[in-house]
Amino acid sequence: MTNRVLIITSNADDAKALQNVLGKEIDGIFKTEWVSHLSDGIERLSSGGIDAIMVDLTLPDKQGIETFDALFAVAPHTPIMILNAVVDEMLTTEAVQHGAQGYLTKSHFGSYLVPLSLRNMIQSKAIEGTFFIEKNRAEITLNSISDAVICTDMFGNVDYLNVAAESMTGWLRDEARGIPISKVMKIINCETREIERNPIDLVLRKDMPMKLASGTILIRRDGHEAAIEDSAAPIHDWDNKMVGAVIVFHDITASQTIALKMSYLAQHDFLTNLPNRVLLNDRISQAIAFAKRCGTSLAMLFMDLDNFKHINDSLGHETGDKLLKSVAERLCGCVRKSDTVSRQGGDEFLILVTENRHAEDDAALTANKIIAALVLPHFINANELYVTASIGISVYPTDAMDAETLIKHADTAMYCAKESGRNNYQFFRHDMNVRAVERQVIETHLRQALERKEFVLHYQPLINLDSGRITGVEALLRWIHPNWGIILPDRFIQVAENSGLIVPIGRWVLKEACRQTKRWEDEGLKPGLIAVNISALEFRHKDFVKGVRTILDETGLAPFSLQLEITESVLMSDAESSAAILQELKDMGAQLAVDDFGTGYSSLSYLNQFPIDILKIDQSFVQAIGTENGNGIIVSAVIAMGNSLMQRVVAEGVEKRVQLNFLKESHCEEGQGYFFSRPLVADQFAELLKTGIAAMNYNWSGPI
C-alpha cells in the first residue's frame, strides 16, 4: 500500500533530501509532495489523501508552535513529524504535547531509518484510529442495551458504568468513578433485608465468574428498590492477567410481578379467587404425604349446589356468578385455616379437611356447618335467593390412597346425596356404583344410537367481530334419546371415548357437517368454514386422514371449507406424530385450529412446529372478562400471540357485551357464543345465514 507524505519546508535542499530517502524504499510505499508555505500545506490537506506530514515549524508565513497548531486543527488524525535544523528540545517537547508523533533533526534527513520511522508512525496512527472505532462501537453498544454494566479495577472501585447502570443505580459515571462498588451498587437479601456481598468481590478474589444470589434487591441511590438478576466475571489482559471485573444485571421487578400474577391465575378460579383443581391436587398430595408420615387421616368433601341451573336460566349468568361468590365466602367461613376450599368449575366445590386423627367426625362437622350456612338467604341484585347443596365425603386412607381416587369417590357419594333428596351429605361406600352403572347404561345406548339415527347436529355461527358477518359455523353434537330427551355431549362424550365409540360417532359428525355445509352452498348461502371437533382417538386412528379425504370426496365439499379443531393436549401427546398428521391435512387444503387454547401447553414452540391456522381461546378465559377478578390478561396475551404469528384468533363463549367490547379493543378477529346465537338446527341456521347476526340482534356498527 502506497502512503502519500506531505513535506512542508521552505528549504529546498531539505525537501530534496527527504524525497530522496523516501523514494529509495524498495517497495515504493511512499509518494511525496512538497510545499514551502503553511498556507499551501493547509490548502493541500483540505483535498485529502495525505497519510503523513513532515513539517518545519519555521516557515515564511508562520513560525513556532503556532505552525503545528494550525496544521493539527486541519488534520487532527494525520500523523505529524517535526523537522528541526537544530535540536530545539523545548519546541519539540511542546509539539509532542500538542499531538505530534515525533521529530527529525536535519543531520538525520538522509538516514535509512527515516522511512522506517515514518512507516511506524503511520501504522501507529492507524492502530489508534481502529482502537478508537472499536472503543466507540463498544460504548454505543453498551449504552444501547437494557442491561446495566459496571466495571471495576482490581480494588473493586468503579471505573465504568453504562447508561442503564446509571439509571438503575442513580449514580452518574463521573460521580461513581473510583467509588467502591459496594457503595454504588448496594444490594440486600429480599427476605432478611441484610446487606449482600457484591459478586465482584468474589470474582476479584477467586478469578472466576459468579452469579448473584436469587432474591437480591438493589437499593438505588435515592432509596428506591428493584429486584435484579446478574452475573459477574473477571477481566483479563492479553497475558491473561486479571485487571478488573465486570458485572451485568437487569431489573426483574416487572417480570417477577407478572410471573407471580400468572402463577396465581393459573392456580386460582377467576370468579371466586379460590384455589382451582391444579392447586388443590398439589395440596392433596402434600396432605396425603403428611398423613402417611404422621399416621393421621384426611377427608375430601365434594359439594354441588342443588338446582343452580334454574337460577342461571331465570336470573342470568351475572346473578349466578354473584351467587357463586357468595357461596364461596360462606364455605371459607366454615373451615379451618389448614383446610382448603376449591372451586372446580360451574357449581362444584371441593373442600379438603386435613391434619386430624378423626377425619370422619371433622368432615361431618364441616358438612353440617356448610349446609346450615348455605340455607340462609343470599341477597343479590335485590333478589333474595336460597340455595342448598349436596355433599359427598371420602376419607384417606379408608376410601382411597391417592388424590384422583379420593375426589372420584367423593363425587360418587355426592350423587348419592342428590338421589337421597339433596341438601344432605353422604359418606362414600364401596357399594356406591351408581355412576358406574350409569356409564354402563349410557355405553349400551350409545352403541344403538348411531344405528337408530338418534344423533343430530346443531350449528353455532362464528362471527367477524368488526363487521358482524358470519364467517363460519361450528357443528355441535346432540343426542336425542327417545326416553331421556336431548343429551348434551358433556354427559356421554367421555363414555364414548373410553369405549372407543367416539371414532364411528366422530366420522358421522364429520360427514354430516360436510354434507349439510355443501347443501347450504348449493342453495346459494354462504356458511363459510364448517368447524368440526376431533377427539384424541379419532386423530390418532390410522385411517383418520384417509377418512377425511373420503368424506370430502363423497360430499363434494371443498377442503378449504373444512376446519378441523384439535385440543392442545391431543397435539402434544405425541408432537412428532401430530406434526405429520397435521401436515397431511394441511396439504389436503383443510384449515387447522387449536381448540380450548390456553388450557394446555400454550407453547410458542409447538405453534411454530405445527401448521396451525387458528387459535380458539377457551371460553373460561373469555367468560372471566368483566368479572371482578377477570382483567383479561391471558386473553390479551393469546390474541397478541396469534396476531404476531399471523394466525386467526377466535374467542369462544362470548356471552356479554363487555366481553365483546374487550375482544374488539384487543383486536380479536372472530368470536363465538350465546351473545351472538345459541346453537341452532340446520333449518334455523339457514334462516340465520339469510338474515345475518347484526340484523337479527342489534345495530353492529353502533357505539359499544
Image (cartoon, grey):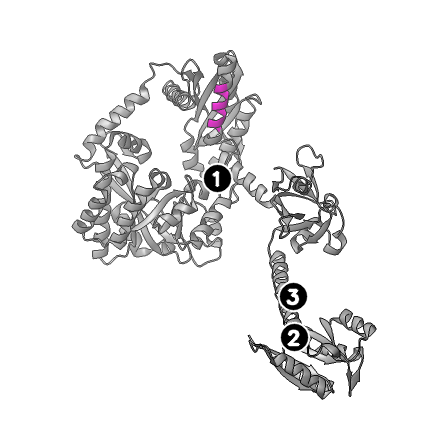
Residue in the foreground of this view, choosing between 27 and 651: 27
Q: Tell which of 684 and 477 is nearer to you.
A: 477
Q: Which of the two residues, 295 or 467, is positioned nearer the viewer here? A: 295
Q: Which residue is mark 1?
A: 318
Count of number-bearing discs: 3
Amino acid marked by disc 1: Glu
Left of 372 or right of it: where is 130?
A: right
Q: Report helix, strand or loop for mark 2.
A: loop
Of the two numbered discs 1 and 2 on the same chain, state the one appearing first in sequence: 2
Range shown magenta: 280-289
Residue placed under numbered mark 2 in the picture? 112
Q: Tell me how far mark 2 sits from mark 3, CA to CA.
A: 25 Å
Q: Residue at x 26, y 24 (%)?
A: 440
Q: Tell me which label, 1 or 3, sits earlier in the chain.
A: 3
Label 1 Cα neighbours within 10 Å, binned few <14 / some 14-19 / many ≥20: some
SS type, badge 3? helix
Task: Kindly check if marks 1 and 2 are in contact, taking CB atoms under 8 A apart as contact.
Answer: no
Task: Find residue 636 and report its horizontal and vertical position in percent.
Answer: 48, 49
Say if 429 sits above or below 563 in the image: above
- Residue wearing tag 3: 128
Seen at 80% across and 72% down, the residue is 94
Q: CA distance from mark 1 to mark 3?
A: 74 Å
Q: Quick one: 62 or 468, which is closer to the camera?
A: 62
What distance separates the C-alpha of mark 1 from that of mark 2?
98 Å
Q: Is residue 97 visible?
A: yes
Q: Is residue 673 magenta?
A: no
Mark sitting earlier along the chain (2/3): 2
Image location of residue 114, percent across then percent down:
67, 75
User: Which residue is at a point 66% across and 33% down the rendered structure image?
Assistant: 191
**Dots 2, 3 in contact, CB < 8 A:** no
Quadrant showing the N terminus: bottom right
